[in-house]
Each structure stands twice: as C-alpha cells, then as structure tokens.
Image (tube, rainbow, N blue to C red):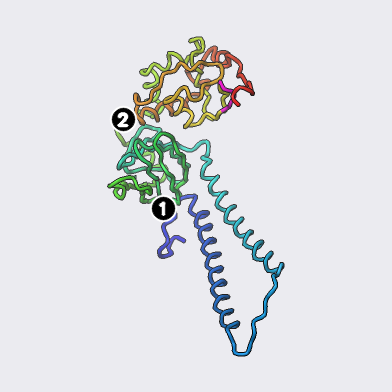
C-alpha cells in the first residue's frame, strides 16, 4: 500500500494487519451499501403503483429471514475475530522487548531509554527490534498516536498503559497526541526516528554520559531507604524484590496478583493497597515524594533484579517464603 495516494505510510509490524482489517470493513460496507440502495431503487420502480393493480399481502419467509440474519453474523464475527486477534497481540509485548518509559504532560512527551538517554518530543528506535512503551501522564489524559505504525494508546495519569511495536522502515514519523488535553493539544507533537541497529547504537552512545535507568533506580532505592526493609536480613519487614517481576504473588487477603509495572507502581505509591501475604502494611507511601521519572527508575530497577543478582543473595528464598500464603477463602467474601 506504500505508494497509494491518501494512504498513510506503513512502518511497523501492525500496519499490514490493521490495514487488512480496515480494507475488509470498508469493502463489506461498500458492498452492503450498494446492495441495499440498489434493492431500494430497483424494487421501488418494479413495485410502483400501477393503475388497476391491487397490492397483495406478502406472508413472512423463514428462508429469507434466516439468511439475512445468519449471513451478516458471519461477517460480524470476522470483524470481531480480526480486531480481537490484533488487539490481544498488541497488548502482549514480547518478553525481550526493549522498554521505553514515556511520560506525557501538558504539552510534551518525555521519553526515557533503558540505557539512560532521555528525549523530549523525539523518540529514537532501532529498526526491526521490538519496543515496549510503558506510558503515564503527569496531568490529564493524553494519547500516544503514531499513524505510520497504526498504534494509538491513551496515556493516563496514575497508572501505566502499555503498547509495543516493531518498526519495519527506517525514517522519521509523526507522533501526535490524540486526546484533547488543553489549549496546546494540537502542538503536542513529536517524531519517531527509526534507525538501523548500528546507527541507533551510535546514537545511544553518542549522547551525554547517561546512566542506565535501572542504575538510577538502584541509587533512588538506596537513598529512599527502601533497602532497610526489602532485604534478606531484616526479619522480613518487606518482601524481597528479586525475581518477583512477571510472577503472580499471593496477597494478605487471599487474592493473588501478577507482578507487572502497574503493581510495582501501586505498591510504591499506595503500599497498603495489595499487601503480600505474610507481611504487615507498614510501608509508608511515596505518593508526592518521588517524581514520575524516579518512579520509572525504581520500577526498572526492581524489574532488573533477578534472584541471582545482588539483592536476594544468601538466605533470601527462605525469608521470602516466610509466613505461608494464607489462602483463607471465606474472609474476603
Ligand atoms: Cu496531550 Cu492532547
């Protein structure tokens, strides 16, 4: 579709599927439109009032009714299936995707690469590599929209929304805010720059001496005193964090929750919301104390911790298991 007039450029793995679905929808709509209006025109001429002809009542037809109910149903299911397949694929980022934190605010986009570089209203991405966006807003609802990639995702204050893509064409592409967010909404634009891997690496290394995000998080972790509880030798005041990301964890109230970016975020800002089984809600909140950037760094740091890396060394597993998950069923209901 690349050179079709009026058609947006296609530069990501989503373009083909989204375009195919769109074309299918348009084709079915056009065919239905022609059929219906054609039938209206034809029948109104054929059955027009004629002198001396008395109209006769027509009884219902099961054959007709079933046909025009069942046939469209298959088309609607096809729309649904096509949409759902793309939707679920879009919401399931590959495990090894490189993770970029996006913070939106009136009226700019801030991007943070895991390797450290930060950008405003510009995002460099490597060609052919999976990129996962972890996005949040500092004020109102914005929407991250890259037409050439066929991606659009609302960016909300107070939580992370996730989106991923793989750029397939080098070049520079428009980034828009697609949710009205105030007087300068239309100026909240930027560019996505897709570079071949080598060029991208050069760009990454060429910036100022930037510290990897997880390392910034490690520093904040120490400065904020997180380590005084989240350690293996502190009588289990706080759960150990190594290796928790991407796994389900049992909660004090019997539920279980998947440890993802949003759970980590909530546990830092509102620690009492979902307390891990076997622990008491003693952690203070960091709401209003840390910035979105620090929060992103902390989340990136916790995600970077593996059972074998630093934090959980030694007697960790035994303590982490302290207080068997209390799966009392009756209480919470
Ligand atoms: Cu941000 Cu519109």
Residue labelled 2 has its Cβ within 8 Å of some atom of ligand 1: no
* Image position, residue 235 (x, y; %): 51, 9
For the C terminus, give its image quadrant.
Answer: top right
Q: Nearer the viewer, residue 195 or 248?
A: 248
Question: Which contiguous range is marked in magenta?
Answer: 252-256
Secondary element under disc 1, as helix, strand or loop, is helix
Determine crowd level at label 1: few under 14, some 14-19, many 20+ residues with C-alpha closer than 10 A.
some
Q: Residue at x 57, y 22 (%)?
A: 253
Earlier sequence position, callout 2 versus callout 1:
1
**Residue 148 is a magenta residue:** no
Residue 54 position by quadrant: bottom right
* Image position, residue 223 (x, y; %): 36, 18
Q: Residue furthest bottom?
A: 52
Q: Residue at x 56, y 25 (%)?
A: 249
Q: Is residue 250 above or below residue 166?
A: above
126 left or right, relative to 107:
right
Secondary element under disc 2, as helix, strand or loop, is loop
Q: Are marks 2 and 1 in contact (CB under 8 Å)?
A: no
User: Most prominent secondary structure in the magenta stretch?
Assistant: loop
Residue underneath mark 1: 147
* Image position, residue 176 (x, y; %): 36, 49
291 left or right, relative to 94:
left
Q: Is residue 33 above or below residue 118?
A: below
238 left or right, relative to 317:
left
Q: Nearer the viewer, residue 59 or 179?
A: 59
Q: Is residue 5 above or below residue 280?
A: below
In this view, the mark in front (2 or 1): 1
Q: Nearer the viewer, residue 249 or 116?
A: 249
Q: CA distance from mark 2 to mark 1?
A: 33 Å
Residue underneath mark 2: 209
């Amino acid at each position: 579709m690349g050179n079709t007039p009026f058609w947006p450029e296609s530069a990501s793995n989503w373009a083909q599927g989204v375009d195919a679905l769109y074309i299918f929808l348009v084709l079915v709509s056009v065919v239905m439109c022609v059929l219906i209006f054609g039938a209206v025109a034809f029948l109104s001429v054929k059955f027009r009032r004629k002198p001396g002809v008395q109209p006769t009542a027509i009884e219902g037809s099961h054959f007709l009714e079933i046909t025009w109910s069942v046939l469209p149903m298959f088309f609607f299911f096809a729309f649904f299936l096509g949409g759902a397949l793309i939707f679920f694929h879009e919401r399931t980022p590959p495990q090894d995707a490189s993770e970029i934190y996006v913070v939106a605010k009136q009226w700019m986009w801030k991007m943070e690469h895991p390797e450290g570089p930060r950008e405003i209203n510009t995002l460099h991405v490597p060609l052919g590599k999976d990129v996962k966006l972890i996005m949040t807003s500092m004020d109102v609802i914005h929407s991250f929209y890259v037409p050439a990639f066929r991606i659009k995702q609302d960016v909300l204050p107070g939580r992370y929304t996730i989106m991923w893509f793989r750029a397939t064409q080098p070049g520079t592409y428009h980034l828009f805010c697609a949710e009205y967010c105030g007087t300068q909404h239309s100026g909240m634009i930027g560019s996505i720059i897709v570079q071949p891997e080598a060029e991208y690496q050069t760009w990454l290394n060429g910036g100022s001496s930037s510290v990897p995000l997880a390392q910034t998080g490690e520093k904040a972790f120490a400065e904020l005193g997180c380590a005084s509880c989240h350690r293996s030798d502190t009588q289990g005041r706080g759960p150990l964090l190594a290796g928790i990301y991407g796994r389900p964890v049992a909660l004090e109230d019997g539920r279980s929750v998947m440890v993802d970016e949003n759970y980590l975020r909530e546990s830092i800002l509102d620690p009492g919301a979902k307390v891990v089984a076997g622990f008491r809600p003693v952690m203070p909140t960091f709401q209003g104390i840390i910035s979105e950037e620090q929060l992103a760094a902390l989340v990136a740091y916790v995600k970077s911790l593996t059972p074998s890396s630093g934090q959980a060394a030694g007697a960790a597993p035994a303590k982490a298991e302290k207080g068997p998950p209390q799966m009392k069923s009756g209480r919470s209901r």
